[in-house]
Image: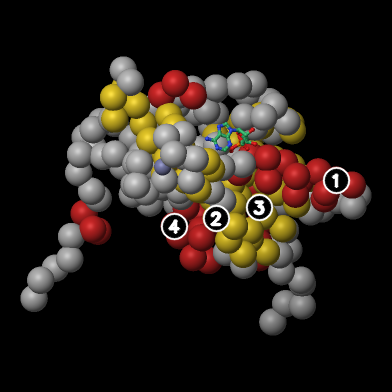
């Protein structure tokens, strides 16, 4: 058995505006201060801000590679001078991100993943639930509910100011006017995801 030290996986999840990017940037900055080699990736689908940066809603930013194909990640990530690897908006990577992350962790890298745990329908988003399950540590953040001010776990999608419908397409990379953080009480959707329905035997 190899004696090479293995790495770790940390997941930072929660709804929009919960501070995932802020927390990811904070951890990556600390790693940089500790003289560690840091590299950051985000899916190129997210063009809300600069393609070369992760930008949080409060304006803090860090350089990132915008990735079209997850196979691009290994070449950078496996370099000996890279110790810590960040991923932002991880829910938008396709499922091939999972073996890539596992390879990096096995190779001794500290991988930190930020992403939405739930889509606007209230269903688990992309590879996030799997990554949460295999992570060493999961940080589930809460935003502030735009309606009542309580802690918010959900991302409310609004279309023309009205709650979006379950059948609307999942991916609409949008700005603040299209999405709000809401608590379970204030979150509105016309149909719950299928896992809500118990099978009665
Ligand atoms: P995320 O990556 O989870 O979308 P960011 O790290 O980009 O979150 O932004 C978090 C920041 O967003 C907060 O520090 C705050 O300044 C701002 N913000 C705007 N709306 C809200 C809200 N409803 N709840 C909490 N923070 C909010
Ligand atoms: Zn509320």
At 72% across and 41% down in the image, what residue appears? Answer: 25
Reading the chain from its start, which is encountered first: label 1 or label 3? 1
Reading the chain from its start, which is encountered first: label 2 or label 1? 1
Q: Disc 3 or disc 2, which is closer to the eye?
A: 2
Q: Residues within 10 Å of mark 4 (few under 14, many from 20)?
A: some
In the shown orientation, is residue 61 left or right of residue 46?
Answer: right
Label ID, residue 32: 1
Front residue of this view, candidates 5 and 170: 170
Q: Which residue is identified by label 2?
A: 140
Label ID, residue 129: 4
Label ID, residue 16: none
Query: Cα distance, mark 3 to mark 2?
Result: 13 Å
Element at label 2: strand
Element at label 3: strand
Which residue sits furthest top? 160
Front residue of this view, candidates 10 and 155: 155
Front residue of this view, candidates 197 and 105: 197
Query: Cα distance, mark 2 to mark 1?
Result: 24 Å
Q: Residues within 10 Å of mark 3 (few under 14, many from 20)?
A: many
Reading the chain from its start, which is encountered first: label 4 or label 3? 3
Q: Which residue is identified by label 3?
A: 112
Front residue of this view, candidates 88 and 144: 144
Residue 78 in view here: yes
Above or below for 123 versus 155: below
Above or below for 18 versus 179: below
């Amino acid at each position: 058995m190899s004696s090479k030290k293995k790495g770790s996986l940390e997941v930072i999840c929660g709804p929009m505006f919960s501070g995932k990017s802020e927390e990811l940037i904070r951890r990556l900055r600390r790693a940089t201060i500790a003289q560690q080699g840091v590299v950051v990736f985000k899916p190129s689908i997210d063009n809300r801000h600069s393609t070369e940066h992760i930008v949080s809603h409060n304006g803090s930013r860090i350089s990132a590679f915008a990735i079209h194909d997850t196979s691009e990640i290994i070449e950078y990530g496996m370099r000996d001078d890279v110790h810590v690897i960040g991923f932002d908006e991880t829910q938008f990577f396709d499922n091939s991100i999972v073996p890539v992350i596992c390879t990096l962790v096995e190779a001794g890298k500290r991988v930190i993943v930020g992403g939405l745990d739930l889509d606007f329908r209230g269903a688990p988003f992309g590879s996030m639930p799997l990554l949460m399950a295999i992570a060493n540590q999961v940080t589930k953040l809460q935003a502030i509910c735009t309606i009542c001010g309580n802690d918010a776990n959900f991302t409310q999608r609004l279309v023309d100011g009205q709650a979006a419908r379950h059948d609307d397409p999942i991916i609409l990379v949008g700005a603040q006017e299209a999405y709000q953080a809401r608590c379970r009480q204030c979150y509105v959707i016309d149909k719950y995801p299928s896992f809500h329905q118990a099978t009665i035997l």
